[in-house]
Image (cartoon, rainbow, N blue to C red):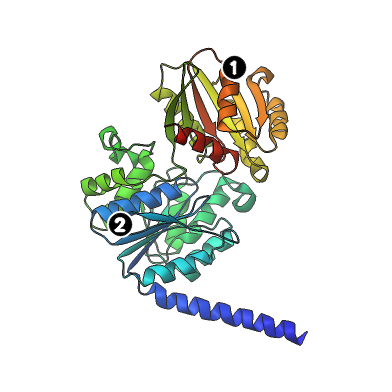
Amino acid sequence: MAGLIFGLFLLILFGVIEFHKNKTYRKRIPVIIHVNGTRGKSSVTRLIAAGLRAGRKKTIAKTTGSAPRLIFESGKETPIIRHHGANIKEQLKIIKFVAKRKIDILVLECMAVNPEYQWVTEHEIVNSNIGVITNSRPDHLDLMGPGIKNVTLSLCNTLPPKGIAFTAEKNLFPLIKKQAEKTHTELIQTHKEDVTDEDMEGFSHIEHKENVALSLGICEHLGVDKKVALHGMYDALPDIGASEIFYTKYKEKDIYFAHSFAANDPESTEFLIQHIKDLHPEIDEVIIVLSTRADRMFRSKQLIRMLTKIEYDKLFLIGEQTGTIRSYALRRHLPANKIVDIGWTSGEKLVERVSKLKSEDFLMLGIGNIGGNGGIIVNYFKERK
């Protein structure tokens, strides 16, 4: 028993020392931008950092998620290797590393989902100067729910007290504003209408005006001209989860595959599906490919409910627990003759299976999850570019 108590004491002492050291390292970083939100965190983190680099700000960025990256001042990046899974203590290591490089700005994507962890990350580790809430959508309801109001309140845990925060959120803006007033945070709302179609033409991947407007607002706040920041964003590498459209040919058929696996909440997914269909009005055949994960069943069911409201020709279920999702789809009155359950698959087998059913050129839309089977499908099409 004495040994257990002593071990617990050492653990607590180590934690106290670690957090004390973090305060010292944090003081060496002039500005930290903490990016939170439901959708687009990684993309916005990259866009902000790229715009700031173009404005000659010495900037390092770190994204999280399924493919965490550390992006250096030059724009080059390296993957972050996690041997024991994601843990918010990772942010301590990033701050320590960055503090030794004498940079101007660190752009840090929030890696916490649990409301309490979000609060601890901001108030005990990051202590940001500028907070970001990209948007608030009904996702991770098992941890932040049960409803959208709860999700929004959770995201507000990273508002910097007496600091400044930016958001592109519209519907829940009044609630965010109310929380910002409680923390004495100056809240600035950005608007997609400030970004023109011409501004968007420089991106090689599908980007959202909301994300661009939000990132530009922060860059301009830090003294970088809009045109300068935009050109920096054009040249930056997109996040691995960024939506892209790939073209390939299979047995004389033209195939377009639109990767939207990372847009895994219904609202964002529905927007992307319609946007991509508008980009290719010449293609009549539209195939939805839903990548399922055993640990994300709630998300798959959300997307099935979303599919009851849109038009498509076939729904292919891939990944894990596809039989369960097929049964759920039938209970939601999706036509049985439109659903094809093929389980875990390769890109080659998926294309072959779809081609057997389709005599003409077709457009495939990948939704659901980038992790698991979704990533395998994306890599298949990337290798055939």
Q: Nearer the viewer, residue 315 or 350?
A: 350
Looking at the image, tell me whether mark 1 or mark 2 is earlier in sequence order. 2
Q: Which image quadrant for residue 370?
A: top right
Q: Is residue 363 left or right of residue 8?
A: left
Q: Mark 2 points at which residue?
A: 74
Image quadrant holding the C terminus, namely top left
**Where is residue 290 shown, x and y percent of the image?**
59, 32
Mark 2 Cα-neighbour bin, 10 Å: few <14, some 14–19, many ≥20: few
Q: Would residue 271 be seen by someone viewing this image from the given angle?
A: no
Residue furthest top as drawn: 359
**Where is residue 131 shown, x and y percent of the image?**
40, 58
Q: Is residue 196 left or right of residue 205?
A: left
Q: Name the residue under label 1.
A: 356
Q: Which residue is drawn at 46% across and 53% down?
A: 176
Q: Residue at x 73, y 85 (%)?
A: 3
Q: Please state the total of marks drawn on the protein image.
A: 2
**Where is residue 135 shown, x and y percent of the image?**
45, 46
Q: Is residue 338 left or right of residue 73?
A: right
Assign a secondary structure to mark 1.
helix
Eyeballing the image, is 362 above or below 328?
A: above
Q: Which of 330 and 46 is in front in this view?
A: 46
Q: In this view, does 34 lie to the left or right of 322?
A: left
Q: Distance between the residues labelled 1 and 2?
A: 47 Å
Q: Which image quadrant for residue 205?
A: top left
Residue furthest right as drawn: 1
Q: Residue at x 44, y 46 (%)?
A: 40
**Mark 2 residue type:** Ser
**Where is residue 37 shown, x and y percent of the image?**
47, 50
In the rendering, which numbered label is found on residue 161?
none
Q: Which of 370 and 265 is in front in this view?
A: 370
Q: Nearer the viewer, residue 148 or 379?
A: 379
